Structure formats: structure tokens, C-alpha cells
Image: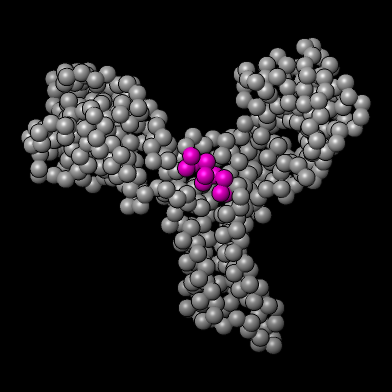
Amino acid sequence: MFSISDTIVAIATPPGRGGIGVVRISGPDAAAIAATLTDRHEPLVPRLATVATFRSAAPHDHVVVTSFARPASYTGEDVVEISAHGSPVILNGILSAAMAAGARLAEPGEFTLRAFLNGKLDLIQAEAVADLIAAVTPLQARAAFDQLEGTLTAQIAAIEQQLFEIVAKLEASLDFPEEGYHFVEPAEARNTIGSVIALVDALLSQAARGRLIREGVQVAIVGAPNVGKSSLFNALLNTNRAIVTAIPGTTRDLLTERADIAGLSLSLIDTAGMRDTVDVVEREGVRRARQAIGVADLTIVMVDASRPLSADDRELLHSTSVKPRVVVLNKIDLPKVVDEIEGIEISAKTGAGIADLIEAISQALGGGETLRDQPSVTNMRHIALLERAKASLTRAAVAFESAVSEEFPLLDLQEARAALEEITGKKTSDDLLRHIFERFCIGK
């Protein structure tokens, strides 16, 4: 999988028909293979789009060929991109002709893998490529693009630099034991480690919010029958997805749709009305609604503000009080009766208060902060390695407090550096690379 001595090819645009499609070739023979596919005999000029005719196989097509000479290309190798009309027949014809000329079909993510192996991207940036392609909300795209631009890489590099300096001093001290040289004092070491731990903590403080942005969240809308759950579900989706009637118990099963709300990818779950019932089907719906509450990242608990609280309302408010939630008082377009609880006042029917509810959802998921600014850390792999680095740093600090031999804190500091280097890919394994890149699409 990790050989970069051959030439690879793949269709780089999504499957299906479109106005344009791109076939990408990368490797030492990219230019030579591209030359066999068209009617042009002159060498391609790097970074100059060239009109040509694809004639190597039927059907023929007018194409635009662009070459990128190594190392000034995405992969760091010679790259040729052939832009043709976006017919699958034409694109597959170009792909087959390139393979017949000596190219190999690329594995998923192999172009980006080669960019990593050739030093064009570090591992953080390579993972950000996949996140940017997979983004379904503007906030996800912004967070991924920031990582692709090297924001997190720079922060990790700053931490690594401080660690490198103290590790170098400790290693120098251990290299001259007979002379009794000590290139770093315990107090200085403790202060440096403390500042490094603070930098790691600053990154980890964003972790929960970052994961929500990258991975999305589940939000369950729950309440007694006829409080307006399905109306709110439709209002947040801006479409009539759920059936709304005046008859209690209309919703019998979980209804799930994805929505972009406050920059987050939310899986909204409309649930059955929570009440005791003898109806077998409705009772199963209530059971599933309780399951949805158990797995949801946030619960929207709806109450009908135009009628007194029922026993079902009170039980639901009590059972969800220990979970992340937003209490919503619906039907404020009618005379308000409920005044014993506080919540976001809305009318799912008229749309009043929906903007306030979206802000409350954002704050509840963001730990009290609105999710407007993208965090540096969003990836669970990065979070786990930062936590490992912090644990090693903490052990090193304790070792200096205990006045033990410098060898012991040095081992802990080296472990912390290894964890940071695994984040950026300076040190990594083939298995990890395979795991990361196999989730990419072919052609990227």
C-alpha cells in the first residue's frame, strides 16, 4: 500500500453524471501516460491548461489536460489531471486507457497518502482533507480547513519545541555523570513542564466541543402527547417531514432527520408522546422514546404552555433533569397558563422564539458558549494522544518534585514527545496509516 514508485490513476470527481469530470494521474510516468491518451505530441507545460482530444478509446472527447511537475503538486510527484465531460462512460474510458498504458488504479486516499509520505502534508492535515470532504455544515468545513492550513500543527509544534529543549538538557546532564553537570535545575524543569501542561490543557478544553462539530450530535425532542413535538421537528427542518394532527399519539415511532443547526450537524429525533397507555404500538413508541433520551447528546423537553402541567410533564421534567437538556414552553401564541417552570418560549406553529431556541441549543451543546468559533482539536485520535501526553507530563512533574534521578522524568518526557509526534505523523505505524487512509474516497 505504501509504495510510491509506481504511477496511479483514479477518477477524482464523484460518481454520476455532471458537467465535468476529472481523472487524476500521479507518479513518475504520469506525463508519459497522459501523452498516450491524447492527440497532442508536444510536451505539456506545467500549470498550463491545454486543450486536447482524447482518442485512445471510444468514445472520444474534447478534454483539458493540466500537468503539475514534482515537487510542486498535491502529491509531490508528477501529476496530470484530465478534465472531460462528466459522463461515466467517458471518464471510465480515460481511466481504462490510462491503466492500459501502465498506471495502477489508486487505493482509497492514496493521492493524499503520497502527499503525506512526500512531506507535502503532515498527518493532521491529511486527516483534515477527509474531514473537509465529509463536512456537511459550514462550521465543520471551517474547522477542517483551519487544520488543513496548519493551525493545530503549529500549536503542537510549539509544545514539541518546549519539550525538545528540556529533554535535550536532561540528556546532556545524563551524558556527563562523572563531571556532575546539570544543565537544568528541578525548579526550571517543573516550570517548563507546567507551562507545557497548560498548553495541552488549552487544547483539550476544546475537545468536547470539537468532537460535537466534527462528528455531529443527536437531539431528541420529547414531551407528552400533543405538546407540539412534530411541529417543532418540522420547524427546525424547515419542511413538513412529520405528520401533525390534533389527535394525541399520532407519532408512534422514532422519526430521524439530519439538520444543520447553529453550525452543527444534528440528527433530530421526533419521538412518541410520553404517557402511560394500554395501546401496544404506542407503548412501544414510548419505550423507544425513552431509549432515545438515553443516547441523545441533548434532549429538548417540550411542555404545552397553554395548559397546566400534567403528571406526565412533571415525570419527564424530573427524569431528564440530570441530562443535558433545553426546556421549551410551546404554544405561546395561546394564553399562557404554565408559570412554574422556566424555559425557551416558542410557538412551533408561528415560528416565534425558534431563533432563541437555536441559540439555546448551541449554548447547551457548547458548554455554555455559543458554537461560533471553530476549535483546534476535533479528532478523537488527537484527543487520546494529547491525554496520553498530559499523563506523561504529569508523571514527569511529580518525579521532579520527588527529587529522583533525572532518568525517570526523562523517560516520561520522551513518552510525551512520542505521543505528540504520533499526532503529526512524525512517528507512526503502517497499521495506523492504513486505518486513516482507507476511509478516504478513491481519487483523493
Residue furthest bottom in the image: 179
Residue furthest right in the image: 41
Residue 403 vs 221, above or below: the answer is below
Figure coloring: one colour
Q: Is residue 408 magenta?
A: no
Residue 172 vs 261, above or below: the answer is below
Residue range of the region highlighted in magenta in the rendering? 138-147
Residue 351 vs 193, above or below: the answer is above
Quarter of the C terminus within the rendering: top right
Majority secondary structure in the magenta region: helix
In the image, taking residue 127 as reference, residue 66 lies left or right, namely right
In this orientation, does residue 56 appear?
yes
Q: Is residue 140 magenta?
A: yes
Q: Give 62 or 96, whichever is nearer the viewer.
A: 62
Q: Residue at x 83, y 33 (%)?
A: 30
Q: Residue at x 13, y 35 (%)?
A: 305
Residue 4 vs 91, above or below: the answer is below
Quarter of the N terminus within the rendering: top right
Q: Position of residue 180 (x, y in %)?
A: 65, 87
Q: Residue at x 47, y 51 (%)?
A: 375
In this orientation, does residue 293 appear?
no
Q: Give 68 or 217, whichever is nearer the viewer.
A: 68
Q: Position of residue 317 (x, y in %)?
A: 17, 40
Q: Residue at x 68, y 48 (%)?
A: 121
Q: Position of residue 413 (x, y in %)?
A: 57, 67
